[in-house]
Amino acid sequence: MVGLSTQVLTPPPRQRPYDQALQRGLDALRQRWPSPDRLVSLGVTLTGETLCLPVLNRRLILDPEQRCVLVQDSGPARSAWAVLAVHYLCAEDLTPDASPVSFSYFQDCRSYLSVFGKRITERFLATSGRTAEQFMRCAEQCGGTRVPGAGDGYCFAVCPRVPVTIVRYEGDDEIGPGASFIYRADAERLLPAEDRVVAAELLLDALSGKPMTEN
């Protein structure tokens, strides 16, 4: 009778796609270091070898040499915020187009429409946008700027050139509350398709009080 092996199999290392994307992004940033004019266009300031990027009502500090992204006066930024910042800084086409558009406007985001509806719109209406009063309180805490018009709208500078406006509609007895997420048309030149989803997701995290730093 052949004895059973007692060898313990070691599980493969856990994949961390955000960390891998961050390292690739930092490599690309070092190879294509932005010129002073590009930094001004992106709303970024340079201090020594570090870049300071305003996000919402905070600032991210990027240090390509140390290969890290920090939340100013706090600690290491969450991986999703770090990747978003690096990809934004690596944008090649900075041609401005401030036309307001919905998420469905972006051709390369069509496959994300159902995901966006569940991960973003439905989540917003169940959390920070559950009532108009709650949305107002959360928006003001994140530095949102009130937008006039139908519904309750606030604009959030997720990145200097990538504002995201959320408009909440109250609904009536037959139709429940709804919400629209509005981007600038040039967001497709500044962030990859998935990052445009992540930008809205990170905004909802901030509205719900989730810190930008790693736990």
Image (cartoon, rainbow, N blue to C red):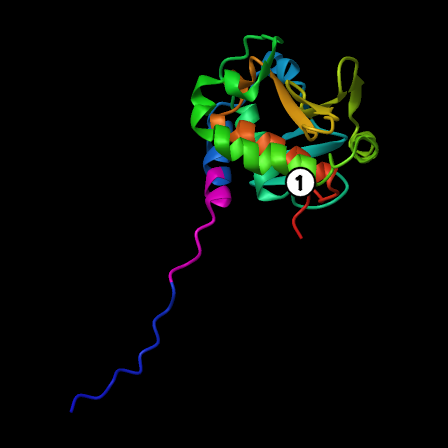
Can you say whether 2 is above or below 163 in the image? below
- Between 162 and 126, the residue placed more toward the observer is 126
Identify the magenta region.
12-21
What percent of the width, then of the height, locates residue 207?
A: 73, 37
Q: Residue at x 55, y 12 (%)?
A: 94
Check residue 176 for magenta coloring: no
Please state the horizontal and vertical placement of residue 26, each as a whole percent of the image: 51, 34
Using residue 140 as the reference point, say whether residue 43 is left or right of it: left
One can see residue 208 in this view: yes
Report the label total: 1
Q: Is residue 206 left or right of residue 16?
A: right
- Taking the view exactly as shown, the residue that stands out farthest to the left is 1
Q: Give the residue displayed 65% in from the left and 45% down from the top.
A: 76
**Disc 1 designates what residue?**
70
Pointer 1 local density, CA inside 10 Å: few below 14, some 14–19, many at least 20: many
The answer to whether 194 is drawn above or below residue 161 in the figure is: below
Instruction: Give me the residue at 48% from left, 40% from top.
Output: 23
What SS does tag 1 mark?
strand
Q: Is residue 82 visible?
A: no
Q: Residue 31: image x %, image y %?
A: 46, 26
Tell me the residue at 67%/40% (across/down). Answer: 70
Quadrant (top left/top right/bottom left/bottom right) for the N terminus = bottom left
Task: Inspect the image, locate mark 1, and give the three-letter code of the amino acid beneath it.
Answer: Leu
Front position in the image: 195 or 146: 146
Of residues 70 and 204, the one drawn nearer to the viewer in this rendering? 204
Measured from the top left, where is residue 177 in percent x and y?
Answer: 70, 29
